[in-house]
Amino acid sequence: MNEQLERLVQKAERLMARIEAVLPQPLSAPDWDASVAFRFRKRASGHGSLEPVRQVAGIRLAELKEIDGQKERIVRNTLQFVQGQPANNVLLTGARGTGKSSLIKACLNEYSGRGLRLIEVDKADLVDLPDIVDVVADRPEKFIVFCDDLSFEEGEAGYKALKSMLDGSVAAASDNVLIYATSNRRHLLPEYMKENLSYTHTEDGEVHPGEVVEEKISLSERFGLWVSFYPFSQDEYLAIVRQWLSSFGIGAERIEAARPEALVWALERGSRSGRVAYQFARDFAGRQ
């Protein structure tokens, strides 16, 4: 009888161990000395973890050209944050390939020596933001939660989670965490022509958006700082090409000779963005 009871207990313990293995576990802290950047990853089991980024992008602020106004605002806000002064969550919006995410990475490289750290979180994992904030809340470093190319469709869970985290939760925001997000959409949600019909007009001419429009605006309004990026002119595009070619060691004479090729390269891609300029420079420098 005792042997049967012991076997039953052993089976129960093994069963409990298997159940615990598939249950969501509290988010644990990573090795904070392993990197200055971390990526939140969620496995199929539902377990989330903060993984150090072994090779951090080496972009520097001085390498980003033709976005001086945007750079000044982002750097100022980030420096305030690093210094322990009040700073805002940031939404960077506008044309693709104009340096939005590169600017955030460059700020990390500029201020990592002063305690700045970055945690990249995918849109699908924004529901875990409260757990991430809890893990870093007592750390001495300053953390930027980075959401790249952010946009939502109607009803996505991450939308409500981000909205609550930015401003609206009963819990106070941690002083050592800011959210920096990039997006091609100013209001982060798709906008439709029919929504314009929901605007109402008062007798004195004042315009009031409808509930659907209000809901879409309400998320982006919770970012304290909006920074807009615009398509580059031809001269701006060529200036960026020159900067990247120079960084690859191409001489001034060859840089000037590369001008027609750079214009054709942009024409073939239908874009004069900083990304296209960098891609051309890599191709040109690799052929020399």
Image (cartoon, grey):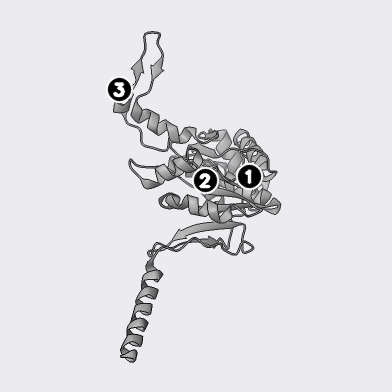
Q: Quadrant of residue 202?
A: top left
Q: Residue at x 66, y 37 (%)?
A: 76
Front residue of this view, candidates 64 and 245: 64
| Nearer the camera: disc 3 or disc 1 | 3
Crowd band around label 1 with a 10 angstrom C-alpha radius: few (<14), some (14–19), many (20+): some
Give the residue number, with chain letter if any, for mark 3: 197
Give the residue number, with chain letter if any, for mark 1: 243
Residue type, numbered disc 1: Gln
Q: How many marks?
A: 3
Crowd band around label 3 with a 10 angstrom C-alpha radius: few (<14), some (14–19), many (20+): few
| First-in-chain label (3 vs 2) | 3
Give the distance between the C-alpha atoms of the residues marked 3 and 2, in whole angstroms. Answer: 38 Å
Rendered image: mark on residue 275: 2
Local secondary structure at mark 3: helix
Residue type, numbered disc 3: Leu
Residue type, numbered disc 2: Arg
Q: Quadrant of the C terminus?
A: bottom right
Q: Would residue 204 be found to the left or right of residue 283 on screen?
A: left
Local secondary structure at mark 1: helix
Residue 21 to residue 189: above or below: below
